[in-house]
Each structure stands twice: as structure tokens, then as C-alpha cells.
Image (cartoon, rainbow, N blue to C red):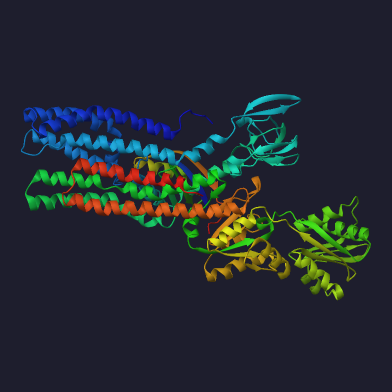
Amino acid sequence: MILSKTTPEEKDIRNWKIKLILAWLFTIPVAVLMFVEKFSLFMIEEKIMTIILLILSFPVMFIIGFSTIRSGLKGFTSLYFNMDSLIMLGTVIAYLTGIFSLFFVIQDYSGISSMIMAFFITGKFVEAKAKGRATQEIRKLLELGAKKARILKIHEEIEIPIEDLKLGDIMIVKPGEKIPTDGVVVKGASSVDESMVTGESIPVEKNINSNVIGATINQDGILYIKATKVGKDTFLAHIIELLEETQSTKIPIQKLADKITNIFVPTILIISALSFVLWLYLSKDLSKAIGISVAVLVIACPCALGLATPTAIMVGTGIGAKKGILIRKGEAIQTMKKVKIIVFDKTGTITKGHPEVKEIYSLVKENHLFELIGSLEKLSEHPLSKAIVKKADLKKYLDVKDFKIYRGKGVYGKIRNKEILIGNMKFMQEKNILLKNHGKKIKEFEEKAYTTLIVSESKKIIGIIGIADAIKEDSIHAIRILNKLGFKTIMLTGDNALTAKAIAEKVGIKHYIANTLPEEKQNKIKELQRFGMVAFVGDGINDAPALKQANVGIAMGTGTDIAIEAGDLVIVNGSLIGVVKAIKLSKATFKKIKQNLFWAFIYNILMIPLAIAGFIHPVLAEIAMALSSITVVTNANLLRRERI
Amino acid sequence: MKKLKITIQGMHCASCAANIEKAVSKIKGVKSVSVSIMTNKGFVEAEDNLNPEEIKKTVDKIGYKVIIVTENKLISVPK
């Protein structure tokens, strides 16, 4: 990859700037001469005046404005008309009146041709600058990646360009340096500033086996990192790719504006021709008819309409990316406005997703119980199983035969020829295991918000395990804000009603749906959708179907583990406050889109008839046109002022 | 189905983006196309056998230039 110093945007701005200076160099004398002529300050012979104006306007029109004239002409030859077609036609007609006026009696508009072109170029320059501002966050993301990496090659440190970095290379990252690519720490410990990708300002502690993200900054220790992703597979590359796609796809509200943009230029060509004929017929004044048709051509502005939505989305997605909110589907911005119900998955979303065994009630010798549960759960990957294995902390695992997982219920296996079951109450009932007089203990655990698992050996209960998953620090705060904003908040969990109720109360969620098996989540969302638009917040890995089912799927991530494909919105750092911000950002962006579309429509609806009626001078028409698209882009940039 | 990302040169206004969309959507095998004036990029969903040259030619004919084409198999099915 060749890294050029100037970005395409900067080149664009510089191009328009040069054109702008050159254009006005010739146009200012034109304006002065026209002023002099109008107020008869001193007399120049009319034909000589026209020739001077034609000479001065020529370079503005056909050299400086060459690309505009050419692209406008291309519109006529290919019948795919564009904005330039209107400017080209308007200015060329005006220029030609100058030549004709040398031979016939007709008003000379040639000076006006260069003035329109100069204002058009000025407008383009300002618009290019505003667009540059609108794309600044994305450009920063593009520039974020490291250019070089220092790697360990047979006891030697060498520096290589980032393109040569390979999977498995061991990178050495010193304090203050950028981590070149995604990887896993193999030696060392440090804290890493991940704010540029997650929006989280507090540095994250990294130890051996921690995942790190490329382009984040190592703070205080030396880290040895094994590269696990390079090139276009890195987290940063994914984010950029995703944003580019969001910014290039359409959202429903845009449809009408797009339809109009599609037929806009040809329609204006027809309207302009009709105004010419009408005015010629009514006033019998050819010059006036020409002036009006030129004004109609240059006042019409499909740009404001076409830019209204994409500029706002550009700025919105950019602000989001900076705060660790990825808008993957632009449509979500529009849908979010109608969402009334927000459903949260419990594990990993409201809670940290790292359950711990809090209490064990053993009816046999504790060692014996630990041996059984540790050995059996060792075979399962479920987070609850992992918590149990960790708690049992066995040196040696017993042999398990006929191991079986009952999803959302429990596990089964034979140890020393005895049938062992670990699972929830439902599972025990299904397996006809009598709870006898342990009901009270179970209830006590559940009221403590523990996920409660029962252990049986040969159909006899031998222990009860209470597991809890700590609530994320900011979950309570976030839920409070969402409740206040008027959303109906609902928690979805596999826990039973008592445990669910206890957790829901702790975080301040009003409603909960308990005993939900993983595969039922999608259906629960479907049922809730009968009451209104539903947003679902869950992790992208296990909850993908539910995220898809919801009107807006909000996927929670932690560092590189994000399943980006799953959600419409992705909260990179997995904090519920991120959800609040994402909702605010969506709403603010959508508001900007509506404002922009409103102004763009109103502008064209008011100005075109005024031009047809002959109230607007062609030069004023061009100024108004330039201002309309500048307004739209600038208004989109104002989105940055919103407090998200 | 596959997805193509095209980088376009020479667009200067919203009707340019609309023109490219209109022209590309008429190519046989193209399912959907979306072009952004802000990013100078377009995303095309098309049948697997569509030749990217076809898109290049079409865009060229109406006065713009495709400078980069990247292809991706479509993994996720849109909602």
C-alpha cells in the first residue's frame, strides 16, 4: 500500500481552491465593468464592452470551468444528466448571448456566465471543505493503524513495515508505543489505552493471555504480543470496512429524496424550456425569457436533496465510532425512533458474564461433592460449568461415562458407575428427582439472586450450588436513564422466576421473562413485537437469532470478541451506557436527516417557482443554489454539538 | 451472490451518484446497488458470474471511472 501524504479530500479542496482564486481573478474585473456600465460611470462603446466581457469570461468558463462544462456535456451525450449539465447549459447560453449581441439586438449576459461559474466554484470549494469536516473521524480511523512493527527474530529485535508482519510473529511493544496489530500477550504486563476504538477512556490492564487490539497504545510496561490477526482481518480494518458500508447504503427516509434526485435534472431542463417559451409568448421579450430560463437552470439544486441524508449519516457514524458505537445498519437510525421496548439479555449484557460460585450447600462430604461436580462440568463449555470447575479446583479429574448436555437445563454423566446430574429445578423434576425438604434452601438461594443448580447422585440430592454473575458497574445507571426516557425495559434470562426477579430488582428493570431457553429468545422477541418495536441487547455470539429478529439488534462486545455481523448497532466496550449513547446518537442523527431533507425540499419548492416567476436574477440564483448545499453539509456537521 | 465494493472517481454531486446507481442497476445479474457521494464508494450485490469489468465499462460510459473493485462472497443474509 502506498501511503500518500494528501488524502483525496484534501486534494479535492486544494483543486477547488486554485480554481476559485483563478476564477475570481477574471470575474472581479467582469463585475467591476458591469457595475460601471450599469450606472454609466463612464462610457465605453457597447460592442467593445461586450468583447472585453467575452474575453474575460472565456478562461473562467472554458479553462477553469472546463471539467464542469465537460461533465455537463457528457450528461447530454449519455442522457445521464447531472448537476453540471444545468450549470453548463445555463452558463453557455449566457455566454452565447454575448456573441449574438454583436450581431443582433439582444441583451448581453456574457458577464453573467463567468459570475455564475465563479460562484459555482466558490460553492464547490466551501462544500468540499465542509465535506472534509464531515469525514474527519473516518479519516482519523484510517490513519490510526501502525505503520511499523518491531518483532523478535531469533533473539534479535528487528523493525519491519506493517505489511510484512505475519501471523504468529512476536511483536515487542514498549511504553508509549502503538500496538501494531491484534494479538495476544505472551509476556509482560501493562495497561493499554483502548479509547480510540472502544471509546472507553480508562486504560485496560493486560497480562499474559490478554487479547489486545491493534492501533491501541501501550502505557507503562513492555508487552510481547503474538500477532493473531493481520491486514484486512484486524479489528480496526473490520470497523473501517463496516462504516464505509453503512455510509454507502440507503435508509428508507431517503427514498423519496433519491427518487426526486433521479429525475431532477431532466425535469428542470424541461421546466426551464417551458419557462422560456412561456415568457417569450407573454412578454415578447427574448432577453427576459433567456434570463429567466438561465435563472431556473442554475437555481435548481439536486445536491441539497442528495446530500441531506448521507452527510448526516457520515457525521453520525463518525461520532459513534469515536465513542465506541458502531452503526452497522443505517436503517437502525430510523427504526430506533419508533422503538418502545428494550429487551436485555441477562448474562454478559447486564451482568459481566463471568459467573462465580458464591455458595455451596453440601449434603455429603464436601471433597466428594467437589470431585463429582468438577469432573462432570469439566466436559462442558458453559459459563456456569466453568465457574463450577474453577470452584472445585481439582488436581485430578475422575472418569466420566455417557456424558450428555441438556441445553438450558443441565448435564448428565456416569462416574464410578453412579448416575450424576447437575442442573436446574426443571431438569430435576424432569428426571424425577425428589426435592424432598430441600425446597427451602433452594428458595433461599434463589431469593439471593443466585442461579441455583442441584446435584444428584443415584437420584438422591447431594448438594445445591449458588452461582452469581456480578452486575456490570454502569448497568444500574444505564437502566435508570432508559426507564426515565420512557422505554419499557425487559430482562430475558434462563434463570427461574425467583432468581430473575431478584436480579431485575437489583438493576431496576421493571419486567423480566424467566426460564427462557437459548433457542426460545427469538420467539420471545417475536411475541413482544406485537406490542411495538423492540430493540434487543445481547452478545453477538449466542444471541444472533434474537438480534436479527428484533427491530433493532444491539450487539455488545468486549474488545476483539465482537461478532460484528450480528447487530444493527454494536457497542464495542459492552457497556450499557453505550446503549444509552447509541440510542441518543441514533435519534440525534435522524433528527438532522429530517431537518436537512426539510430544508432541501423547502428550498427547491420555494426557489424554483420564484425563478420561474422572474423574481430572481441569474447570479443571485446561483448564490442561493450554492448556499443551499453548503447549508445542508454544515447542518450535518452541527451534529457534533449534540451531547451524546 | 457476491458483494462488490467499487471506488469511483469523478463524482461531484448527488445526481452523479444517482446516475451511477441507475446505470449499474440495469446490468444483468446486478441485484442491488448503492453509491455514496460522501465516500466515493459503491456497494453492488450481484450474481456470482457477474464480471466486474461489466460494471467498470458501464460506469465509464456515463462519464465516471471505477478505480478499485474488491469482491466478497456474501456471508450474512440481509434481514
The reply, left or right, for residue A537 in relation to residue A355 is: left
**Tag count in the figure?**
0
In screen coordinates, is B56 left or right of A277? right
Front position in the image: A591 or A259? A591
Residue A422: image quadrant is: bottom right
The residue at the point 53 percent across, 38 percent down is A141
- Pick whichever, A290 or A33, lies toward us: A33
Q: Where does residue A615 sit, x and y in percent of width and height?
A: 17, 49
**Residue A218 located left or right of residue A569:** right
Q: What residue lies at 72% left-to-right and 56% top-to-bottom?
A: A470
In the figure, A328 relative to A226: above or below?
Answer: below
At which x and y percent is residue A641?
45, 46
Residue B45 image point, x, y percent: 48, 51
> Looking at the rendering, in which quadrant would you find the N terminus of chain A?
top right
Q: Is residue A8 visible?
A: yes
Name the image quarter holding residue A97.
Answer: top left
Is A610 left or right of A75, judged from the image as shown? left
- Residue A585 placement (x, y as % from top left): 50, 52
A612 is higher (above) or lower (below) than A525? above
- Residue A382, visible in the rendered structure: no
